[in-house]
């Protein structure tokens, strides 16, 4: 790999590149889907290739190939330089990356059990057992359970002198039960919504999930939702569990803090951002107890790695400090435009895509409350858990979320189950209304393996950590 990398970088420089980097990537994925007691889907895929990124005449060029050879490395590098030269004819400014980043390193996801070493029969048996437990609940119409695994071997090398090898391993799984009534259907999932919980971890994580033990419970909750009262409409206090807060953070903090959106260089899928440059360091994003940060170093979190796809080390950086907006997610180029150093968030969905600014692990710091005390301190409100739906505008301001499960809160205690719970708000008003956050005992990090961005589309694997939190004066029950 080193010889191919050196050939590409040398070829790029001979073509006039003032900077060049290459990523050589091999990906291996496996997925299993069980539905209604049968194996519905099974796949095992591998792909490999490399992408070369260059700066010529102050403009970017990128080209890629699935053929790993010395001649192909030189050809693709020359092609990238040719594209950069053409792009420079329409450039608005010269690309400046700031100070050099030079690292020679190796990083590997710590795992106890390689997920690809586990026999397929064992994985399917676990999913079938979980499926059977869900179907014990009377009234269940559809059951699904799934697993997904990823191994990614990456080499990054740059003309500045970096050479970084990484092996990233992921494991994920989840179950879902759907009950169908006369005029509606209700779905519950475990441990998270939209398929599964996923981490940078080995198969030991799958065993810790206890999918079988939770199968019947979540199926019975789906059936119970059919006869539960509708979530009332009005303005009230809301307590969100950590799974719902994870998506709230993703949509209303993670996406708007991506600096390429602020500059208008990227708007696909998630729009631009209300967090314009004039707000940096002074804008009150949330209440004084709201602290949000990016951290790509958290053990086993889905957005964790050693180095990003520009060769910048994984790191922790603040986004919101005591309620004030203080930092963006940056690349080398966008950070330099602010006179800063990149906080290492550039990642690409494979060898044939150019890196974009992507969330890593964006988290809400825990507070001080015990959950029982938080409920007891809430006279009237609604507890909402596990995302069901979401909608947010192109500036990441106006939003509406729905949850799979909700309970009324009356006189400091959880009451009856409610169905079709929704809440809506405006991002800074909502976060300013946060007056209590549970402590680190309740803090969990949730993987999100389907964050879309870019054109052509790229999917990133990110994560969000949170503990249950309380928000005042929230409009609920909007349909």
Image (spheres, rainbow, N blue to C red):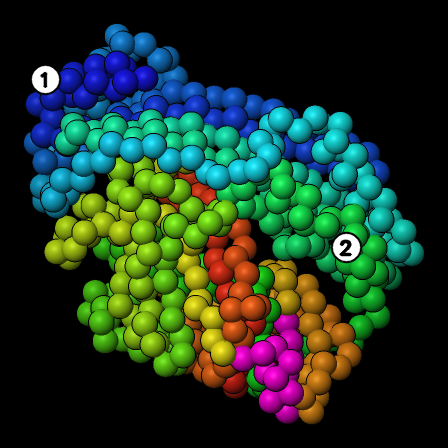
> Quick check: 137 left or right of 269?
right
Residue at point 53%, 75% (across, down): 438
Residue 79 in percent (x, y) is at: 22, 19
The magenta stretch spans which residues? Answer: 369-384
Residue 105 in percent (x, y) is at: 29, 33
Residue at point 15%, 50% (across, down): 336
**Label 2 element class:** helix
Residue at point 45%, 30% (across, down): 152
> Quick check: 339 left or right of 447?
left
Residue at point 43%, 21% (across, down): 48
Q: Earlier in the sequence, mark 1 or mark 2?
A: 1
- Tell me, yes or no, whether the highlighted magenta stretch contains residue 307: no
Name the residue carrying label 2: 214
Quarter of the figure that contains the C terminus: bottom right
Above or below 470: residue 99: above
Q: Looking at the rendered structure, which numbered label has been put on residue 14?
A: 1
Q: Is residue 247 visible?
A: no
- Tell me, yes or no, whether the highlighted magenta stretch contains residue 383: yes
Instruction: State the separation of the CA atoms marked 1 and 2.
Output: 60 Å
Viewer-closest of 423 and 67: 67
């Amino acid at each position: 790999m080193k010889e191919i990398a050196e050939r590409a970088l040398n070829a790029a420089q001979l073509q006039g590149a003032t900077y060049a980097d290459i990523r050589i990537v091999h990906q291996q994925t496996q997925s299993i889907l069980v539905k209604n007691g049968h194996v519905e889907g099974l796949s095992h895929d591998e792909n490999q290739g490399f992408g070369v990124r260059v700066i010529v005449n102050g403009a970017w060029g990128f080209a890629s190939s699935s053929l790993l050879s010395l001649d192909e490395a030189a050809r693709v590098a020359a092609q990238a330089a040719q594209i950069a030269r053409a792009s420079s004819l329409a450039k608005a400014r010269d690309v400046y990356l700031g100070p050099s980043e030079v690292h020679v390193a190796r990083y590997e996801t710590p795992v106890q059990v390689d997920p690809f070493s586990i026999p397929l029969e064992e994985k399917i048996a676990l999913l079938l057992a979980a499926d059977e437990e869900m179907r014990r609940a009377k009234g269940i119409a559809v059951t699904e359970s799934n697993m997904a695994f990823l191994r990614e071997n990456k080499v990054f090398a740059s003309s500045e002198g970096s050479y970084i090898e990484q092996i990233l391993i992921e494991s994920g799984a989840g179950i879902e039960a759907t009950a169908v009534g006369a005029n509606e259907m209700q779905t519950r999932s475990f441990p998270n919504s939209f398929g599964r919980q996923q981490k940078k971890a080995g198969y030991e994580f799958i065993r810790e999930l206890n999918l079988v033990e939770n199968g019947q419970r979540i199926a019975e909750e789906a059936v119970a939702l059919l006869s539960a009262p509708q979530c009332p409409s009005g303005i009230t206090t809301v307590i969100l569990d950590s799974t719902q807060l994870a998506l709230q953070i993703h949509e209303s903090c993670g996406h708007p803090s991506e600096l390429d959106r602020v500059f208008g260089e990227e708007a696909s899928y998630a729009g631009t951002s209300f967090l314009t440059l004039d707000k940096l360091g002074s804008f009150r994003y949330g209440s004084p107890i709201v602290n949000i940060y990016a951290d790509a170093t958290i053990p086993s979190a889905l957005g964790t790695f050693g180095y990003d796809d520009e060769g910048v080390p994984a790191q922790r950086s603040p986004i919101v400090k005591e309620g004030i907006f203080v930092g963006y997610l940056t690349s080398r180029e966008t950070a330099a435009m602010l006179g800063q150093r990149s906080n290492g968030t550039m990642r690409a969905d494979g060898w044939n895509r150019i890196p974009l600014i992507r969330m890593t692990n964006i988290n809400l710091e825990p507070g001080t409350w015990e959950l029982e005390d938080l409920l007891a301190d809430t006279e009237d409100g609604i507890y909402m858990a596990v995302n069901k739906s979401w909608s947010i505008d192109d500036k990441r301001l106006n939003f509406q979320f729905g949850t799979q499960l909700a309970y009324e809160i009356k006189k400091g205690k959880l009451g009856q189950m409610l169905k079709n719970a929704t809440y809506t708000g405006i991002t800074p008003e909502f976060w300013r209304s946060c007056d209590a956050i549970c402590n680190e005992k309740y803090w969990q990090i949730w993987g999100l393996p389907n964050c879309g961005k870019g054109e052509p589309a790229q999917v990133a694997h990110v994560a969000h950590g949170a503990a249950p939190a309380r928000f005042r004066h929230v409009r609920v029950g909007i349909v």
